Image: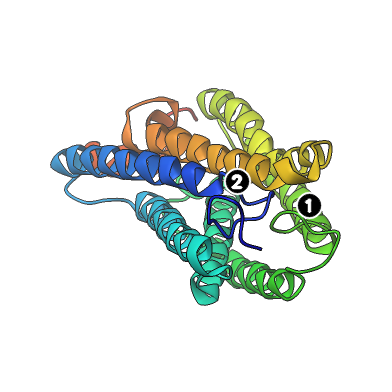
Amino acid sequence: ANQENGSEFSAELRGTRGIVWVQLFISVLFTWFFAKECRKFVRSADSLHPVVITLACAIGLQFCSTVFELIHLHNYNNNGYGVKPLDVLSEICGMLVEVLLSSLLILIALGYTLLHSKLGDLDVVIPIVFIIGVVHVLLVGFGKIKDDASYKFYENEGVVGYILVVIRLLLAAWFLWAVNETRKEAGMKLRYFLAKFAGLGMLYFFSYPVLFIITGFFAPYYRQKVMLVGWFAIKYGVFAWMTSMFLTRGDYFQVSTLNSSFLPGGVRPGLDKEE
């Protein structure tokens, strides 16, 4: 319904456009920073590793998600329904970001770039990731069908949200199992890295379930904004962590095959130098 100030925003959506404008500003700054770090890395290594390219795709998708959502909200303010296809695309892009980040963490936990320079037998993970991606996209569609449900005050509230929580917990269990399996083949230096990696990775996998629960404690008209800010903060926190991990010569660089680009013979630092 049209508000006193001429806006079509409901109480739940009021203020969200301003939040998304801030998110777009942060997205532009971070994308610029990431591109700068990639250029610096390429000057040393001549090319970008697939994990960096995958992270770049996730950052690009999140940028698109933010732009689509802003256009949708701008139109919603004027006509009361926005641009539905862009709203759906924004959600799909956001979900695919989650799939890419989860997949990266699980592949690394399984030993990719740590014990193996190539996917090899780990390529069986790809079809599983594809299925997870399809499930997430279908959940977006189901969630949009339920957009007008009386119990729904923010994206993915209700059944869809609970399904996403269960998926996250299952992915967390897979991630932890993978880390433990890789640890069995690791030297001391790699085990030290895996301990930190497992802790931060589990924080990511549990972040959405915790955010989902916390959001439910807020008044209905605040929930959309809490979820919008929280989910964005989680994603960019992970982007910053992975950028630091992949593009600086820290712990991950020292134990991973990214370091082999700088070493004669392509040594696997995490395993061969230790054993």
Residue depicted at 42% across the width and 40% down the height: 22
Q: How is the image coloured?
A: rainbow
Residue 181 visible in the displayed image: no
- In what quadrant of the picture does the N terminus appear? bottom right
Rendering quarter of residue 50 = bottom left
User: Residue flagged by tag 2: what amino acid is it?
Assistant: Leu
For marks 2 and 1, give the CA distance: 16 Å
SS at circle 2: helix
Rendering quarter of residue 87 = bottom right
Residue depicted at 27% across the width and 51% down the height: 48
Residue depicted at 44% across the width and 32% down the height: 252
Q: In screen coordinates, is 163 left or right of 122?
A: right
Q: In screen coordinates, is 155 left or right of 129?
A: right
Q: Position of residue 199 (x, y in %)?
A: 65, 29
Q: Which residue is mark 2?
A: 228
Q: Position of residue 94 (x, y in %)?
A: 54, 58
Rendering quarter of residue 103 = bottom right
Query: Which of the two residues, 191 or 230, is positioned nearer the viewer here?
Result: 230
Point out the tag, 2 or 1, that comes first from the N-terminus: 1
The image shows residue 83, relative to residue 256, as above or below, that is: below
Q: Nearer the viewer, mark 2 or mark 1?
A: 2
Query: Which of the two residues, 251 or 61, is positioned nearer the viewer here?
Result: 61
SS at circle 1: helix
Q: Position of residue 165 (x, y in %)?
A: 78, 52
Q: Which residue is mark 1?
A: 165
Q: Position of residue 75 (x, y in %)?
A: 46, 66
Residue 258 visible in the displayed image: yes
